[in-house]
Amino acid sequence: MKRLKVLYGVVGEGMGHATRSKVVLTSLARRHDVKIVVSGRAHAFLKTAFPDVVEIDGLHMIYADNAVDRDATLVSNLSVAPALVMENVRAYFEHVRDFEADVVVSDFDSFAYLYGKFHDIPVLSVDNMQIINRCKHEAAILDGFRGDFRIAKTIVKMKLPGCYHYLITTFFYPKIRKTRTSLYPPILRPEILSAVSTRGDHVVVYQTSSSYTGLLPVLESLSNVEFRIYGLGREETDGNLTLRPFSEAGFIADLASARAVIAGGGFSLMGEAVYLHKPTLSVPLRGQFEQVLNARYLQHLGYGLCVEELDKETIVRFLERTGEFADRLSAYVQDGNAKLLENVERLAVEAATVG
């Protein structure tokens, strides 16, 4: 088999794309020469695992009270846009131009995608976002969010048009409406695949927005429930609340032994919770339609609940139904990452040969 040169782009907003891409990159790097372009915190994360990682600049989100602050995000990104373009042009000429890739893989990253299109190199899209545009969603899933859906669909459609193939990772399976599209189970870290799922008494809470200050008093009022809380950036114990600093091993151990999960609508944690059969109460970030979509399908499948706000009554109602949700989750099975990795390899070789 020919050893390919693969340019792999990873969007740097949040860490979910980076942790999932690491799994695919590890598989590809066994057989091919891989150069990675990535922005944000994801750069430092991937730099520790791979030898050829190029830092680029990317856009970012600003959050306020468990919602995306669209105005602040727009103003902030516009203010840095000229410097961002210049930095990425520099990165291209210094580190990427002479790589001569055979194929490009993009995890929702525009830099690698544009490189592929500019040089007439086939591009594979590997991410969860394309499900918004390339699949058909039932009216009940979109109800109340059709405007947000249309905006998100347009953005996703414009992000990576005309790829050789779109490999979409998902735990729900709507009807595919576009050619060159296939659906695969969520990409899972090896540590998740090796974790043994048990059912303890505690609830794992993952809160990505430190500005969401109303959460802790609500949890504290449920004094008979132990909550182990990640994402607030501090370590302390106060009654039934245990705030933990982030530790991958510690988080996975708590997740695998949890009774249930309370989190946003991010795809990575939701996919891990589904795999480990953990009922999830999802509170999607306002202004993030992709999270709404994930959470609504979660509820539609009977794996948990999707709510817009957290209050004591909602959490009590959710906890009373965790047995029901766990029963539905018990039927979910996934053969690790085998299906996706096999097809990424196959399509990369095919695209490089055809392209």
Image: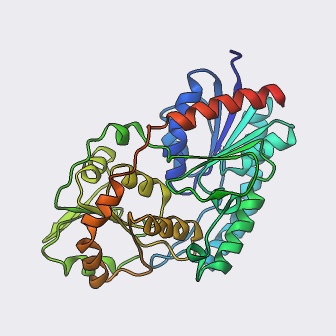
Q: On the rendered image, what quadrant is the C terminus found in?
A: top right
In the image, taking residue 103 as reference, residue 302 lies left or right, namely left
The correct choice, above or below, for 2 with respect to 314 in the image is above
Image position, residue 90 (x, y; %): 76, 43
Q: Residue furthest top?
A: 1
Place of residue 314 in the rendered image (x, y in percent of width and height, measured from the top left): 31, 81
Q: Where residue 261 appears, x then y in whole percent? A: 31, 63
Q: Give residue 267's position: percent from left, percent from top.
A: 49, 57
Q: Nearer the viewer, residue 69 or 316?
A: 316
**Residue 32 to residue 243: above or below:** above
Q: Residue at x 83, y 29 (%)?
A: 354
**Numbered label tally:** 0
Q: Quadrant of the N terminus?
A: top right
Which image quadrant is residue 205 in? bottom left
- What colour scheme governs how the chains and residues are painted in the rendered image of this protein? rainbow
Tell me, yes or no, if residue 50 can be seen here.
no
Residue for point 59% across, 71% down? 289
Nearer to us in this view, 18 or 76: 18
Left or right? Give the position of 40 relative to 331.
right
| Residue at horizontal 70 percent and vertical 31 percent from the top | 348
Whether residue 338 is visible to the viewer of this picture, yes or no, is: yes
Could you tell me which residue is drawn at 65 percent across and 79 percent down? 146
Residue 206 relative to residue 308: left or right: left
The reply, left or right, for residue 24 in relation to residue 282 is right
Q: Looking at this view, is 218 or 161 the one in front?
A: 161
Quadrant of the rendered image containing residue 6? top right
Residue 194, placed above or below residue 349: below
